[in-house]
Image (cartoon, helix red, strand yellow):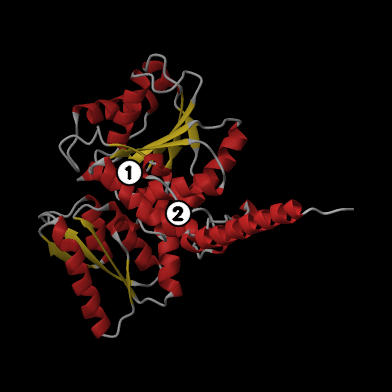
């Protein structure tokens, strides 16, 4: 076969173009970060199961229908409630779920004392103190606010447990005081484990990945699939855990946090800070946009621990229709959000909506 000169030239040009493309591709790959390659679900689940966890209490709280509440709200969706107000440790609620991972990590590090912070009537501080005492650990609490003359509610339990309380005037002073306390304890030879506010870090938040798994098993038994979960959010740990669980178990349920105190952008930031190392630990993609996290900051009113007219109404409506008590700090404001969504028809009447009661009922005894 005769090969003409122009054929050689065509081959040469094609080869040169191909080499140039290879060189450009190689250079681009060197400049561009490698894409995340997620693990398969089985590997991620295996990683999750290997994370240290203590069993502090039976955490399988019931999911119940709220038919009378639904009837009181015109054209409302099917309403359900997850009863973490039934948990032990004096209604430890969402804080107790986080403690199972936090205290497991403290013991893994051979801690002798835990240090944490909160307000004078902090649920988190009280549950941390109870769990620490149960496990034979010393506990120091840095609490802001005025110390009551007669100890009541959470502060009363802190006092009965005999843990060391360091009082500060404001929220802003808590972190520096906590660091100071930790340094002093280490100088004495203690092994200190510092628990962040609300235990809402990449360790404690795994409590709500486990909670999400628990919920999936329950909805299967109930024969329903929840379209949305509504709950109270503040330090972001509950939201981080639910969002991570949603990704781990590959579900599309809408997760709506109703702020008890801070603007939505702040809480999204708290949640994302915990989520990214959690997702990395599980081998899941760590790229999460803030817009993927829904936080409603329209219901906290004048601020933390200050009831609104809507939260008062929600408290009465839950009490009268279902005999369920709400705390004024967190769940009442979340319930006000839920009621508002029903009235504004945010959900369809055929939707299944889960309200997650996060506990905190000792606030009723202040």
Label 2: few (<14), some (14–19) or many (≥20) C-alpha neighbours in 10 Å:
many
The residue at 51%/44% (across/down) is: 246
| Residue at 30% across, 61% down | 196
Image coords of residue 176 (percent x, y): 18, 67
For the point 30% across and 81% down, which residue is it? 190
Q: Classify mark 1: residues with Cα within 10 Å, few (<14), some (14-19) or many (20+).
A: many
Mark 1 = which residue? 233
The mark tally for this picture is 2
Please tell me whether mark 2 sits on a helix, a strand or a loop: helix
Q: Compared to 156, does 217 lie above or below?
A: above
Image mark for residue 207: 2
Residue 92 lies, in percent from the top left, at 37, 51
300 versus 192 height, above or below: above
Against 200, residue 359 (above or below) is above
Q: Is residue 269 left or right of residue 8?
A: left
Q: Position of residue 269 (x, y in %)?
A: 31, 50
Q: Nearer the viewer, residue 54 or 285?
A: 285
80 or 213: nearer the viewer: 213
In the displayed structure, 79 sits above or below 186; it is above
């Amino acid at each position: 076969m005769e090969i003409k000169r122009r054929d050689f030239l065509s081959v040469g040009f094609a080869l040169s173009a191909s080499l140039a493309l290879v060189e450009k591709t190689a250079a681009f790959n060197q400049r561009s970060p490698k894409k995340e390659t997620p693990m398969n679900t089985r590997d991620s689940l295996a990683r999750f199961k290997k994370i240290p966890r203590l069993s502090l209490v039976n955490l399988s709280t019931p999911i119940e229908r709220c038919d009378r509440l639904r009837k009181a709200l015109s054209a409302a969706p099917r309403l359900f409630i997850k009863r973490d107000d039934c948990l032990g440790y004096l209604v430890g609620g969402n804080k107790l779920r986080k403690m199972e991972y936090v205290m497991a990590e403290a013991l893994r590090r051979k801690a002798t004392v835990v240090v944490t912070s909160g307000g004078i009537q902090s649920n988190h501080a009280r549950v941390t103190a109870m769990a620490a005492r149960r496990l034979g650990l010393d506990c120091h609490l840095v609490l802001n606010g005025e110390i009551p003359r007669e100890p009541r509610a959470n502060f009363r339990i802190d006092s009965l447990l005999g843990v060391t309380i360091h009082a500060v005037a404001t929220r802003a002073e808590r972190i520096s005081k906590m660091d100071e306390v930790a340094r002093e304890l280490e100088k004495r030879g203690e092994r200190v484990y510092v628990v962040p506010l609300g235990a809402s870090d990449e360790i404690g938040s795994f409590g709500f990945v486990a909670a999400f798994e628990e919920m999936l098993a329950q909805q299967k038994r109930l024969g329903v699939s929840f379209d949305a979960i509504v709950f109270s959010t503040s330090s972001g740990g509950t939201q981080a855990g639910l969002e991570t669980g949603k990704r781990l178990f590959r579900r599309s349920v809408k997760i709506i946090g109703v702020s008890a105190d801070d603007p939505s952008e702040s809480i999204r930031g708290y949640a994302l800070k915990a989520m990214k190392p959690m997702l990395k630990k599980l081998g899941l993609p760590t790229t999460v946009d803030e817009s993927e996290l829904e936080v409603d900051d329209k219901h906290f009113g004048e601020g933390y621990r200050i009831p609104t007219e809507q939260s008062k109404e929600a408290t009465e409506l839950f009490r009268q229709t279902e005999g369920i008590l709400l705390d004024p700090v967190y769940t009442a404001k979340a319930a006000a959000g839920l009621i508002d969504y029903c009235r504004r028809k945010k959900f369809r009447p055929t939707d299944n909506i889960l309200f997650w009661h996060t506990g905190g009922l000792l606030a009723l005894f202040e």
